[in-house]
Amino acid sequence: MLAAFTFTPALGMFLAFVALTLVITYFSARKATGSAAYFAAGRSIKGWQNGLAVAGDYMSAASFLGISGIIALKGYDGFMYSVGFLVAYLTVLFLVAEPLRNAGKYTMADLLAYRLSPRPVRALASLSTLTVSTFYMIAQMVGAGGIIKILIGVDFVPAVIGVGVLMLVYVVFGGMLATTWVQIIKAILLMAGAFALSWMVLGRHGYSLTQFFNAVSAADYAGTRAPVNLLDPGMAYGATAANPWGAWDFVSLSLGLVLGTAGLPHILVRFYTVPDAKTARVSVVWATAIIGVFYILTTFFGFGAATLLKYPLTAAGLPISVPLPPDAIPLDAKNIPDGNMVAPILAHVLGGDWFFAFISAVAFATILAVVAGLTMSASTSFAHDFYTNVIHHGKEHRPGEEVRVARITAFVVGAMSIFLAIQLRTLNVAFLVGLAFAVAASANLPVILLSIFWRRFNTTGACAGLAVGLISSIVLIVISPSVMDPAGKALITGDPLFPLRNPGIVSIPLGFIAAVLGTLFTREPEAEAKYDELAVRAETGLGAEKATAH
Amino acid sequence: MSAPDNPDLTPLSGGPTDVAPLGRTGPKPAHERTAGEDGDPYDWAAIARDPAFAELKAAKRRFIIPATIFFFVYYMTLPVLVGFFPEMMKTPALGKVNWAYLYALSQFLMTWVLCALYVRAARRWDVMNATLLSRFPPR
């Protein structure tokens, strides 16, 4: 396993990053006493800082590794992820960020429990948070395993376990403050890496956009395949004779992306780290600016890869140690290109060992930051919603108990996703994350919106919406072509029962309908009576949780 | 832990905790209420009934509802067009760049413009909000 272990520039940069973040964690750990400090960084993060942190939390392995790979292999259809990931921020800004900051404390469920019966609502919201976070985390772990494999030459399994342990150190000792700073540093590094990579790609095309797009519209993978126009839609989804439902897959994917972000627990918890709703707004605007630039750059290092890299070089899979085969698009274990390592390999071709080292370290930083954010939100939700509020009726039996439970949960969540990532290592990470978005949009978003904007909304409706959204999206994924394949290329062999790869178009309306029907079947005068207070709090910010003094 | 504006002067008997029981727990009998609970500092219902609050809500909705419908329709047009009319979207528009890519790129611009418009509108709401709240000091 460690036989191929040699000291490389990549390893050096990676170790430098780890050392830097551990120093941050050490200083954060000394501040992280008390729940508000541990779970919400004392609510004292500045607007631009939180904007960078939101961007750092959001631009995950899916964005950097997954999207560049899927664009390099499937062209335009991969770019649809870039567009959807950004436009989704309008949903967050317009509908969710400010009311959530005004009326909540640590988690999404705080808002729901405000006027609904807290125990059933929190239990289900916590379950849905854990599900979305785990899905998302598997994607990050799969990416991390791949990166470390080419970076240090360690096998996939020990690599994934290593990432898991490191992320636990940040979360368990440093809490939200350490996580925030890891995310800020990562966002800056990632933007620098993306700019450098794009500039070099453009350099290969004479710094001319015309020349670049001409090459992309007849991309030949450095002469190893017949030229294809990658700007044409339809290579991944689109309707074909074999798959007449393909066009609906486009719609379903887009719906999941644009509505999913506003239900992602690890993004929502970031708004509790700022002093007030106005700062939450500023941070969304910062995040939107940074994220937008990044996703436009995916054009260059995604499409660009298809003009500069060779299509499958070896059938034996990717050698596990550096030096790399100079310009291969890597294959996974089943010899199907998953594209997850396109960006680092492109960096190696364009900038040599040192640039490869830098980009790999950036990709790794990316994954660590996101995984830390996910673990943080999952463990916060379990400790605050489930343990304290459901099991113990909202009381801490001993001081500091909630934080202690959160730290233990972080261990469990980490171990679970390490296990699942090892099982699901062959999937494209952007695709995996797309599924997490669909679950978030189906289960979380309907109940968040209805709770803020509909007086009549009640506990039955919230439970029905959460349960139906969660179950329908997961069942549809399990019976979709991604999991069921007649030729045995997926987890289950057999004809898929549902024709679309993305469940959103069915499961999101189902989540909304269930929430509305559940509400209409019952009356809950207490919930309606408390709506005035919630509305005043959500709209004006009166009585919102304040920043804690250090 | 010793917030100066805390109206509850009951001495703390347990350890310090900042976990507040959130959510509806049912009305407590009057004799069980702490001083803090007895004096909820704000009259939520009065604010909710205030015409200035209705105006604030209406002002927000006048921007948010049309803007949300606009961006949702503008965005969802993209998958519908590339999914159902791929041949049309494959037509070159600018050199080799086709309509599909140009329309996707326009989504970035649309997002940034709507963001800017929202921030401008929200500045007005902040002023309305401050005026409203200045009339309801904590009691």
Image (spheres, coloured by chain):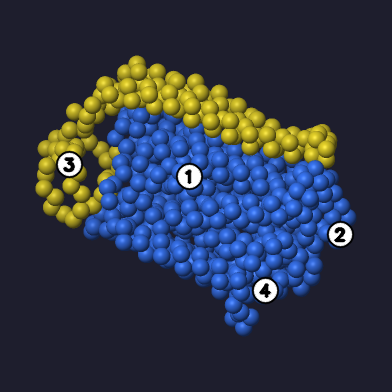
Chain colours: A blue, B yellow
Residue A31 seen from this side = yes
Decide: few, some or many residues near mark 1? Use Cα within 10 Å; few <14, some 14-19, many ≥20. many
Q: CA distance from mark 3 to mark 4?
A: 61 Å
Residue A322 numbered mark, or none: 4
Residue picked out by circle 3: B4
Do the residues at discs 1 and 2 belong to one chain? Answer: yes
For badge 3, the amino acid type reads Pro
| Circle 1 chain | A
Residue A214, horizontal then vertical, whole percent: 83, 45
Query: Who is closer to the viewer here, A374 or A471?
Result: A374
Circles 1 and 4 on the same subunit:
yes
The amino acid at mark 2 is: Gly
Q: Residues within 10 Å of mark 2 (few under 14, many from 20)?
A: few
- Identify the disc placed on residue A51: 1
Specify whether A438 is left or right of A547. Answer: right
Between A120 and A550, the residue placed more toward the observer is A550
Task: Give the residue type at disc 4.
Answer: Val
Q: Which residue is mark 2?
A: A223
Residue at the location (83% across, 35% down)?
Answer: B91
Nearer to me, A361 or B6: A361
Instruction: Quote the CA–CA distance across marks 2 and 3.
Output: 73 Å
Please say if the residues under marks 1 and 2 sit with CB atoms less than 8 Å apart.
no
